[in-house]
Image: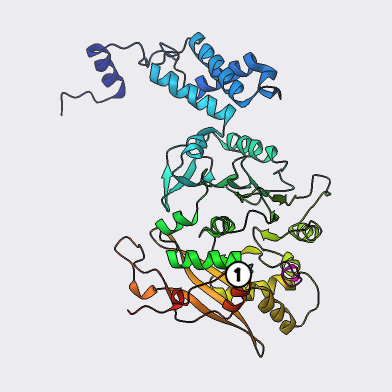
Amino acid sequence: MSDQPSTLRERLARIQKERPSPALLSLDTPEPVVEIRSSGVIRQTVHLELMKELGPALFDAGMTEDDLVGRVRSTLSEVISRSNCPMTDLDRHQMAQQIADDILGYGPIEPYVRDAEVTEIMVNRHDHIYVEKHGRSTRVAAEFSDEDHLRRTIEKIVSRMGRRVDEAQPFTDTRLPDGSRVNATVPPVSPDGPTLTIRKFNPDPFTAADFIAFKTFTVQVAGFLDACVTGRLNILISSATGAGKTTTLNVLSDFIPAAERIVTIEDSAELRLNQEHVVRLEARPENAEGSGLVTIRDLVRNSLRMKPDRILVGEVRDEAALDMLQAMNTGHDGSLSTIHANSPRDAIARLETLVALAGIDLPARSVRQQIASAVDIILHLQKFRDGSRRMTHVTEVVGMEGEVVTMQDIFLHDFGAGVDSRGKPLGHLRPTGLRPSFAGRLGACGVEVDDAVFERAEQ
């Protein structure tokens, strides 16, 4: 060890003697031998030059998306080529992609927005990003330059949809142009800095056949639900967050006959129906002046004047529950909606709570009678440990017994089958052996359901 240099100055001197390099710093001079520029500084310089070159062309309403992309990429290549920064071809390509993503997309998360396998993007902080693939969340190396970079990206997203997020309105729900759901928060409600959550939707909407392949439900259940939708039963879909309520609602909407007029009501328009006779309504928050608010409840009331055959409410989360129940009880059957709940029984209790938010002093029994009369079926979904999403309950709302809403499970997930080592459920939906009381109503609508569907199979 005695022949090893003992000081930093000696070590550097030996390295310079053995392998001279102009990039090394000399301890005797305060300035570097050559100028070293970080990739972030280079990227910022090229970005500014690009903005100077393109100018108003970036905001030209007459320029198509394809023309804009082509213009940005060609100009970007020219600007990078003119720069005197030492970069490999790979570095140039990566920098060009990063800057293009910033201008044309959503910065460092743009590759994950484009990735069809990514279902959720979660930005906890500017330098702390997770994505969900195949039901599993993992942290990725991508990060925003700083909080301002993330804030600009959030403002780009929300402003496109006419929303805002600032200190006065520090959180918002909106969507991307493809329908993907977006939630953003900024300080003071998120003290660690802005956050961004994007729940993506498959560009090719799932169908009942996909759900059967995913084992979300069985072929028999798919046929039964087809009959229920065609037979104009009112269906409520419940689950915890992220278990697939909206996707299931979209799948069930495929069973609605093409000739029927459908009105969809959502906070952010996410449903993508294949029918043509569809009117989409979307709620709107108040503007900076505190006016212009349009709530789900306003839209439910308005939809009753639009001659709908079906009303689809994306999610019941407030006093609009009262108006939805009244619509179902006044001839607008065949409606579908979703609600956050832990079980079908909890969905009934939550509906009752939401009705109370309307501020109308109704006896509890009266509210429960409305619920029992309006809702025919509750479909409950659950997300399992392996990330798979399964329908676990197909439950009929039978009626009232005293003060209690009575229910019976028509199909129930076989929880007793357990899960494998990866947490994948081994069971599936099985008939309980009970025949629904509304089977006669389906027959009156010309929809026949084979009683064998309800027969309990031998274990």
Horizontal and vertical percent position of residue 395: 54, 75
The amino acid marked with disc number 1 is: Gly
- Where 333 sits versus 387, above or below? below
Decide if residue 360 is on the left or right side of residue 335. Answer: right
Horizontal and vertical percent position of residue 340: 59, 65
Depth check: 434 or 141 in front? Answer: 434
In this view, which residue lies farthest toward the bottom? 402
In this view, which residue lies farthest toward the front? 446
Occupied quadrant, residue 324 = bottom right
Decide if residue 409 is on the left or right side of residue 444. Answer: left
Q: Which residues are magenta?
A: 326-332
Q: Quadrant of the C terminus?
A: bottom left
Residue identifier under label 1: 446
- Where 229 sits versus 100, above or below? below
Q: Quadrant of the N terminus?
A: top left
Which residue is at a point 46% across and 41% down the rendered structure image?
116
Depth check: 136 or 294 in front? Answer: 294
Q: Is 331 colored magenta in this rendering?
A: yes
Horizontal and vertical percent position of residue 131: 46, 46
Work out whether residue 169 can be spotted: yes
- Asked which colour scheme the image uses, the reply is rainbow
Depth check: 223 or 23 in front? Answer: 223
